[in-house]
Image (cartoon, rainbow, N blue to C red):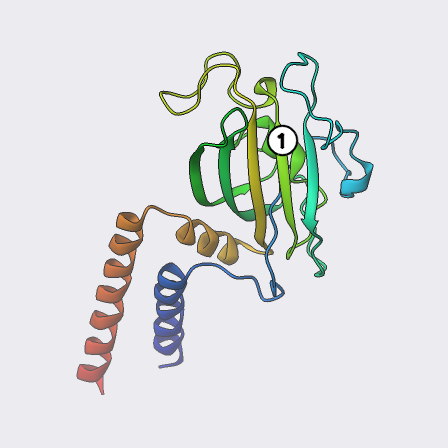
């Protein structure tokens, strides 16, 4: 019976996490970040980046620039290899047009996001917020991205670090919270069906 109860608890946890999203036990506030692919660098103050206020969209050598609007107060720090959940809003710097916003979970340094994110999120603490200004060579280059982001576009992202997973379970929860709503519904439906079948079977056994 103990094993059966553990299975029910585990499945219920998956169901709730998929429906409600991912929050780490220590995540009392939010943070937005992008990560610098340089091992051992965990302090945002050590990043050698461009000036935020003097950022130039006409300078071909312009580097990534950032500004922390809220410094996190928790112990969790974004660094290479960490699995992070980031809420974001992206806009074109040329006209301030918002082209995307949402939440994403990924492992820093795995090249799952643009280089500007991989560089700019390093050093953020859970609970902090950061604004990134990203030149095209660290974003979508001269090709752009479909009809949404033109070639050579400089991008600005308002980022918030929502959490850092500390184990495989939390990583799965984070992935579920960042899924397309239709996929979340599917997994919730499957998990609910399994829980129902387990409970029904247990009632017959008793």
Which residue: 24% across, 80% down?
202
In this image, 151 relative to 165: left or right?
left
Snapshot quadrant of residue 199? bottom left
Which residue: 40% across, 68% down?
13
Query: Residue lying farthest bottom?
Result: 206
In this image, 45 relative to 13: left or right?
right
Q: Residue 3 location, x and y as percent?
A: 39, 75
The residue wearing badge 1 is 133
In this image, 203 relative to 7: left or right?
left
Element at label 1: strand
Which residue: 37% across, 78% down?
5
Q: Which quadrant is home to the N terminus?
A: bottom left
Snapshot quadrant of residue 55? top right
Residue nearest the observer in this picture, 16 or 27: 27
Q: Residue 116 location, x and y as percent?
A: 61, 29
Residue nearest the observer in this picture, 86 or 17: 86
Give the crowd class for mark 1: few <14, some 14-19, many >=20 residues within 10 Å.
Answer: many
Query: Residue lying farthest front?
Result: 95
Q: Residue 57 location, x and y as percent?
A: 62, 19
Q: Which quadrant is home to the C terminus?
A: bottom left
């Amino acid at each position: 019976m103990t094993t059966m109860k553990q299975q029910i608890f585990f499945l219920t946890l998956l169901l709730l996490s998929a429906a409600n999203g991912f929050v780490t036990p220590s995540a009392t506030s939010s943070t937005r970040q992008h990560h610098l692919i340089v091992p051992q660098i965990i302090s945002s103050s050590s990043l050698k980046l461009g000036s935020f206020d003097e950022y130039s969209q006409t300078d071909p050598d312009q580097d990534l620039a950032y500004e922390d609007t809220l410094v996190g107060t928790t112990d969790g720090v974004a660094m290479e290899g960490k699995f992070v959940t980031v809420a974001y809003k992206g806009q074109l710097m040329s006209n301030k047009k918002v082209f995307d916003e949402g939440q994403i979970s990924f492992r820093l340094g795995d090249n799952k996001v643009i280089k500007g994110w991989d560089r700019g999120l390093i050093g953020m603490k859970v609970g902090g917020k950061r604004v990134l200004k990203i030149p095209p060579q660290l974003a979508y280059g001269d090709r752009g991205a479909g009809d949404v982001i033109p070639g050579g576009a400089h991008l600005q992202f308002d980022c918030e670090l929502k959490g850092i997973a500390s184990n495989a379970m939390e990583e799965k929860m984070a992935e579920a919270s960042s899924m397309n709503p239709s996929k979340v519904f599917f997994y919730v439906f499957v998990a609910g069906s399994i829980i129902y079948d387990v409970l029904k079977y247990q009632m017959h056994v008793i």
